[in-house]
Image: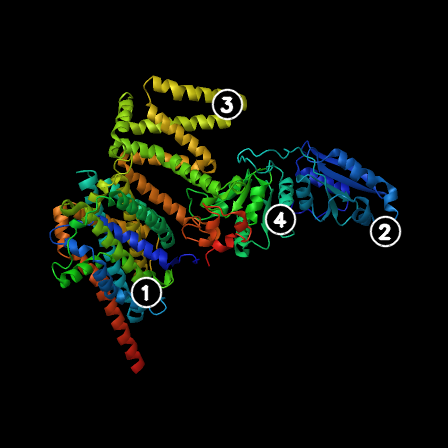
Amino acid sequence: MTNEPDLYKKAEDNADALRKRFADSFDFACRLLEIGGKPAAAVYLDGMCDEMKITESVIKPLTDERNFSLFQSREQAIRHTAYKGLSISEIGSLDAAAAAVTGGNLALFLDGGKTAFSFSMQGFPKKNVSEPQAEMNERGSGESFCDNYKDNAALLRRRLKTPALAIEHTAIGRTSNTDVLICYLTDRVDAAMLNKIRRRLQKTGLDTLPGSGCLKPFLSGGAPALFSDTGFTERPDMLAAKLSEGRVGIITDGSPFALIVPYLFIDYFHSLDDYMSSPVYALFIRALRLICFLVSAALPGMFVATCNFHPEVLPPNIMLDIAAAETKTPFSLMFEALAIHLIYEIVREASLRMPVAVGSAVSIVGALVVGDAAVTAGLIAAPMLMVVALTAISSAVVSKLHESVALIRFCMIILGGLTGFFGIFAAAGLILADLCGAGAFGVPFSAPFSPWIGKEQSDAVWRGSWTKLARRRQSVKELIRR
Amino acid sequence: MTARGRISAFQFFCTVFVCRIIALFTFIITDKNAFPPGDRSVIFLPFLLTGLLAFLPAALVTGKKEDRTIFTLTDRLHPAISRGTGLLYAAGAIWSAGVSLVRFDLFMSTVMFSGAKLWGFILFLIAAAVLIALRGPETIARMSVPILALLAASLLYVSVTTGKEFDAANLEPPLRNGILQLVKNGYSAVARTSEMAALLVMAPRINGGVKKGIFFWLLTFGVTVSAVYTLISGVTGAYGERQMFQLYALTVLSKLGVIERLDALICAIWVLCSLTRLAVYILTAGMFLNGGFHVSENAKLYIGICIPIAAVYFALSGSVTSFSKVLASGVNEYVFSGLLIAVPLAVLLAERIGRKRKEIR
């Protein structure tokens, strides 16, 4: 390949060279034509391009001699008149031609031509815009991102109709060359932060990019943390809202989830619905989510610690009921809690991975075996089951934090079972340090609470009224350490 | 906002508050160190006055613009002095960390888990503190603020739930042993704030008025101590006087609605304070060694610092009686006086003499 010229003189030679590069793949298509009286070759990948569009918009007009009579050269005719409405670009090498073809373009080589042409002919099958699957909303938009990055860019553009919205294109993955878009508002983003993001994306060194989530560790940098300071969303309206705060969005081709950098801890507790309801209700619901986070992370551990070490915390009658139920089970409280949470995680994982038709069966078996049979058989006590149920429901409220919460929960159970509240609070200290120490691109993850930023409190746990929010422009620039 | 690696004065003093208050909570009252109950209500006055005097040398070391460390001055004298100073302060931090762990261990094994061997838990705390210290001063400073908020909430809870039992007849008049004794008690309370030595190495990293911060910190902490002791005396009276850990005795009495006793939960919050205090000592020991010997502050150094901390802990944690004897010898007061008064004064003096000599030449 190193001895190859940029482009061969003959169109057919160029087509042959590309064919060799694609190792005679079955979907490699080449059509030899005569354009303006000279031979030409159109190369594309079958299935990646729209065949009808190729015939109607490229082959037919190009082979019509009348289109060439007004121009001095074939290149001029192609460039200026013939194919309005098509995205056409010039390519000067076989490498660029190969990249264009893999992207669903048609590469056109002309005999004796110094450049070739690339026509945007994408016609590959793709998922349509559908309802969000992971971020349900009561009163927000019904559209979610899809797998195609261009469609996702369009969804974003529709919500931010301003020339200030910049969408930069880059490709990541030595082999996959996955299209990645960096989106931001030029008048709000912090330039230094943006440059850092660009640099980190360029330095990934990935071979392939299976999904947007693979970019997270490269963006966060630093030591691995329990909570990610890179967020994700499948909602274009959410991404638009975050970009308007000066953040940067990263859209990856083939992934319906866009990344948001930087992302704060408090963002995990925000939902678009909060902005549609009254401030008081928003406060209530955000506080509830925070409580659910604490419950899902610490309740089982606290329950085990209370029963094992600190029974004085609960009123004697409740404690006696719990003790009566627990004496009937053969296992220690800590083992019981660990086992039942492990079963819960197994059921959850199974229902995620199994075909939808079988999923309901798994849920029924899980509910019957764990919920009923285990209690009846005297393997698990009913109070513990209640704790697990409450924990599971609470973790669903803050589903974006599930990964971190599941790990914390197991640690809390073990520490609660071995050392009581003291171990739990020591672990809480570590978690707090993790929260306070994280922060991508100079934005503290624990902001605006620690460090306390008064100006930003109007949309943290408390959500100010729209009349107030409309007067101020929230921006992460305020949070960046100077 | 602060640049990377820098903290605000508010965060710094929140950290010192959190560190110092755990020394108050786990303070072992013996016959030798017990303050007369009446003096405790007004302890904030001598605490403020003696504190201002005691922290003056440290404040002077930081310079007018608070952009100097103690090593800025010692480096001007001789590199060997810098190394000696680094070693001395690191040893002080290690000693204080060890003593702090013993206090916490004795508190836990005396009132919470009577007779339990807690060395495993203490080693876990040390490991956790190393992990926190590795994340730097910014992380510790930021995490101190929510811990302080939690602590304030727990103190408020205890005050509200036990306030109804408050009886002014339990209080005693101050100055029973004379004003000199009150001042002495004030100084010994100040002398338990050895973590303030961090100022000597961290001042350039602190944004805002450090000197003003010292005054407000002394005032706030002194008033808090006085208020807490007044509450303890007013609620528990003579019963409280016989308790080794008086605030714990108060938390046991707090009760609200169906919640029977929250003393275990409240004391669990103190674990957070202990962890912060330990992390601060490990971090400052690392910073002092870095200042004196120019070693990089990394995991190896912090683990190395933990070994003598654990050794101090194992050496002193035998029994309350032997530990009380160590404390009664006044070793902590000597450590504080040496590190925060004598050495900074000596360094300031030597640096000034050296500068004058250069000017004369």
Considering only vertical position in the picture, is A271 above or below B305? above
- Evaluate whether residue A174 shows in this view: no
Mark number, residue B211: 1
Q: Nearer the viewer, residue A180 or A419?
A: A419
User: Which residue is the site of mark 2?
Assistant: A72
Q: Which residue is mark 3?
A: A359
Which residue, given by chain and number where applicable, does mark 4 sit on?
A: A167
State which tag comes first along the sequence, 4 or 2: 2
Q: Are the two marked residues, 4 and 1, in contact with CB atoms closer than 8 angstroms?
A: no
For the image, the number of numbered tags is: 4
The foreground one among A320 and A232 is: A320
Q: Position of residue A332 (x, y in %)?
A: 28, 26
Rendered image: mark on residue A113:
none
Classify the position of the N terminus of chain A by image quarter: top right
Nearest-to-viewer mark from 4 and 1: 1
- Horizontally, residue A37 falls left or right of residue A142, namely right
Q: Position of residue A2 (x, y in %)?
A: 64, 47
Measure how far apart labels 4 and 1 are at the Cα level.
Answer: 49 Å
In the rendered structure, which amino acid carries the disc numbered 4?
A: Ile
For residue B268, which quarter of the picture? Answer: top left
Among numbered discs 4 and 3, the one appearing first in the sequence:
4
Please tell me which residue lies in front, A24 or B81: B81
Q: Position of residue A105 (x, y in %)?
A: 70, 40
Q: Secondary structure at mark 2?
A: loop
